[in-house]
Amino acid sequence: MSDKHDSLHSMRHSLAHITAAAVQRLWPEAKFGVGPVVENGFYYDIDLGKTTISEDDFSKIEAEMKKIIAEDQAFERFTEPVDEAIAWADEAKQPYKRELLNDLKREGTTVARDLDTSELGLEAGEESKVEEVSFYKNGDFTDLCRGPHVKSTGRVGAFKLMRIAGAYWRGKEGNPQMQRLYGVAFETEEALDDYLKALEEAKSRDHRLLGKQLDLFAFSDLVGSGLPLFTPRGTTIRNLLKQALLQTGAKYGGQEVGIPHIAKRELYEISGHAQKFSDELFAVKSHYDIDFVMKPVNCPHHTQIYASQPRSYKDLPINYMESTMQYRDEKPGQIGGLGRVRAITVDDGHLFCTVDQIKDEVIKFCNFIKEFHGALGMYGDHWVSLSVRDYSKPDQYIGDTKDWDKAEAMLEELAAEQKLHAKKMEGEAALYGPKLDFMYKDVLGNERQLSTVQLDFSTPKRFSLTYTDADGTDKAPVMIHRAILGSYERFMAILLEKTAGWLPFWLAPEQIRILTINDTVMDYVGRVTEQLDDTLLMKPLKYNELRYSIDSRNESLGRKIRDAVDIKIPVIIIIGPKDVAEGAVSVRLRDKEEKMSLSELKNFLQQLS
RNA sequence: GCCGACGUAGCUCAGUGGCCAGAGCGGCUGUUUUGUAAACAGCGGGUCGUGGGUUCGACUCCCUCCGUCGGCUCCA
């Protein structure tokens, strides 16, 4: 780590203390949780009992923080034996700090995950039970803390309190909920200003805004939350993605299948989903005394296609894929935009193979992901999670431990070979096996999983799937679950945000709009559209269609251009009397204008698509 | 689900206990036929998210529900 990074970190951490100190001055009864550094800033968890901090209080808190900064209080470090520290926590009426200290004394570390070790008074990686813990004190405010800090409160940069939100103490749902006060901080006012401006710009690229502006999707209170409705334009994008996935998938050996959207509950009892995800299952009651559910996943259905025929080792791998909607009764609080919905369109695939075939097949899927995302300029904006079991909770998973060990080892080896730079994430595995998850960030910095490749030795056994091996014995195939987009909804969200709505030519719902300058050019426009239709005959385009429209409204050219640009049409063709006279068209692209003859136009569009 | 904020016209937003609730843009009608990011004029348009309560009187205060946003938790 560079010195600069260190100082930025110390400064942000110091600001967390200053925030807490200011809150303590304003609300002396405040009980404090933890206050770590996060990306771009810091937060502090605070419990004020019955009173709550609201955004209206920010100016008051910031003013108090500025006073503390102006006072230039020194950050003094001292240590105490752990028992004295506990006595301090009691005296200061800080039950959360006391809990942390008790854990420190008993375990030598705290048991909660995601806790910043700078709070714990011990070095990262240190496992032994602690004798002493360190404190930092500035002015009247003393906090259990490992540090480091800046020398004094006057030596922090520019900061701003951003938002207040609820957060469970130590991240556990059963625990009391505290208020988490978030701030951002940078070395200079200019850097803070740049950050805030970038944040505003990012908000303007939010897919929820773009979805409305570009007329791609909508929500209705009557239909329900988390149930997106796709407009013709949005549907065009979805259909194009589907077509592209089918074409590319076929190249990698995939075959399209189709399944109904409900099934007997029993199907999911066998797979294990009904038990593990009972809260998220939509029930469908039949008049004939059969319990159905909306499918929350597609793997069990696909296993039954496999099971519909006797299989030989010569048939493997069998590679099913389809794009289909699945339904999950998500908690209302976590639904939002296209990022998390109740009706999810997945490009789901399940491949059945022998153990020997696993490696090749997983590599193929990784290449598929690379090819597909790469073509959209998205490959590289991600990191890969090697999602393995939580080894302390074996009952959360199905299948043999031996199979799990094998599967995890295979994925790890393969990820290293393929240079995926995967990070091992314990506790992130699926119910039935470990996986490689491709993680992307949305425009506001929230992580979203898109692609996934999952190894599963368990499900085939649960459904008694077999194939006859070369030696005549029946064996269970291995199942590989995979999604390239993950979900269409989430993928569209990330792609829209990345491109700010300027989709590549082949994906643009409306690729070309012809703007007329006056009515005298209409005959000529007819000749131009013939050329456009002809472009297809010359050589089939990637998806064999050219989507264009004609704007011959009684409006100014400026107005027509504005409307076309607002809806982010990549190619605008302007036709006026001058173009007619020259036998040409004026082409306006996002960043340039060009005059083209009609044959040049054809070639140009061929190259674009 | 939990904590907090919010919900006024198709969109963006004004209006914090007092006559029939406002603007800009969009829409519609008319005029204008326009050369690279918004022509001009006129006209429509709202049970102020929903249901209840307090009050002489509620867009405004209180409660329920629905929805949105920021987090937390969860994520096959």
Image (cartoon, rainbow, N blue to C red):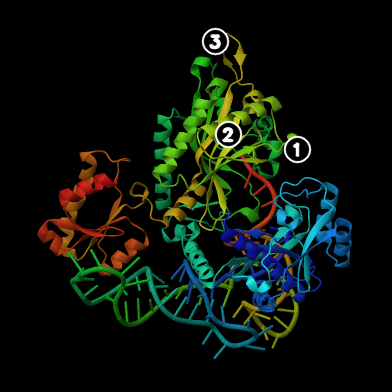
Question: Identity of the amino acid at label 3?
Answer: Ala
Depth-wise, is mark 1 or mark 3 nearer the camera?
A: 1
Mark 3 vs mark 2, CA separation in Å: 26 Å
- Residue occupying the point 59% across, 28% down: A410
Left or right of A78 on screen, residue A399: left
Classify mark 1: residues with Cα within 10 Å, few (<14), some (14-19) or many (20+). Answer: few
Viewer-proximal residue among A243 and A2:
A2
Mark 1 vs mark 3, CA separation in Å: 39 Å
Query: Which of pointers 1 and 3 lies earlier in the amino acid sequence?
Result: 1
Q: Secondary structure at mark 3?
A: loop
* Figure disc tally: 3
Question: Identity of the amino acid at label 1?
Answer: Ser
Q: Secondary structure at mark 2?
A: strand
Question: Identity of the amino acid at label 2?
Answer: Gln
- The image shows residue A486, relative to residue A200, as above or below, that is above
Which labelled disc corresponds to residue A392? 1
| Disc 1 chain ID | A
Across and down, in percent, residue A329 comes to 64, 47
| Disc 3 chain ID | A
Query: Which of pointers 2 and 1 lies earlier in the amino acid sequence?
Result: 1
| Quadrant of the image containing the N terminus of chain A | bottom right
Q: Is residue A588 visible?
A: yes
Across and down, in percent, residue A98 comes to 84, 59
Q: Is residue A165 visible?
A: no
Q: Are marks 2 and 1 on the same chain?
A: yes
Classify mark 2: residues with Cα within 10 Å, few (<14), some (14-19) or many (20+). Answer: many
Answer with the quarter of the image where residue A100 lies. bottom right
Which labelled disc corresponds to residue A454? 2
Which residue was labeled with disc 3? Answer: A470
